[in-house]
Each structure stands twice: as C-alpha cells, then as structure tokens.
Image: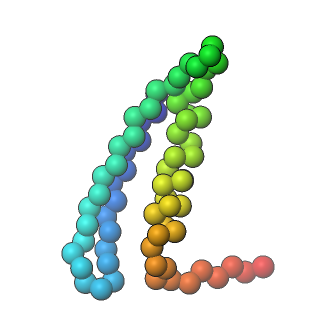
Amino acid sequence: MVLLHHEVEVEYPDGRPTEKHQATLLEFGKVENGRPTTAMALTVGIPAAIGALVSSSLEPHYTCHTHT
C-alpha cells in the first residue's frame, strides 16, 4: 500500500488571493494474470506526470539557466 498526501499553497505575484490545495493518493498492489505489481511500481510515475502536465500548461514566470 502507498499513501501520499500533499498540501500546496499557491501565491500569485499579481496579488490574487493565495490558494490552498490538497491531494491524496491511496494505491494498493494488484495481481493480474498471476503477475503481481506493487503499489510502489504503480505510483512512482503518477506524481511526476501530474507535475509535468500542470507545469507545461502554465506560463513560466522565471528563467532557468544551466551552467556547463
């Protein structure tokens, strides 16, 4: 079993009211066709995928520089 709970507070630079969001994920392992899949294997990519989708839909307010 995997249980994740996140609380996020969003502050906008343009003065809009602060938003508070909560997200909870509960997952159990599964057995399909006699093959077990752990809850960890099912959930490792989900938070990263959600973050990537959300961040790709937002306008960037910063610039990222990498040093090589």
- Which residue is depicted at the point 59% across and 34% down? 41
Q: Quadrant of the C terminus?
A: bottom right
Residue closest to the far top: 34
Which is more toward the observer, 4 or 28? 28
65, above or below 4, in the image: below
Q: Is residue 11 left or right of residue 68?
A: left
Using the rendered view, name the quadrant where residue 3 is placed. top left
- Which residue is depicted at the point 44% across and 32% down? 27
Which is more toward the observer, 28 or 68? 28
Residue 47 image position (x, y, % from top left): 49, 50
Residue closest to the far front: 33
Visual colour scheme: rainbow
Count of residue discs: 0
Using the rendered view, name the quadrant where residue 40 is placed. top right
Residue closest to the far right: 68
- Which residue is depicted at the point 39% across and 40% down? 25
Q: Is residue 36 left or right of residue 53?
A: right
Using the rendered view, name the quadrant where residue 4 is placed. top left
Residue 19 image position (x, y, % from top left): 26, 67
23, above or below 21, in the image: above
Residue 31 image position (x, y, % from top left): 56, 19
Residue 45 image position (x, y, % from top left): 57, 46
- Which residue is depicted at the point 56% across and 84% down? 63
Q: Is residue 14 left or right of residue 33?
A: left
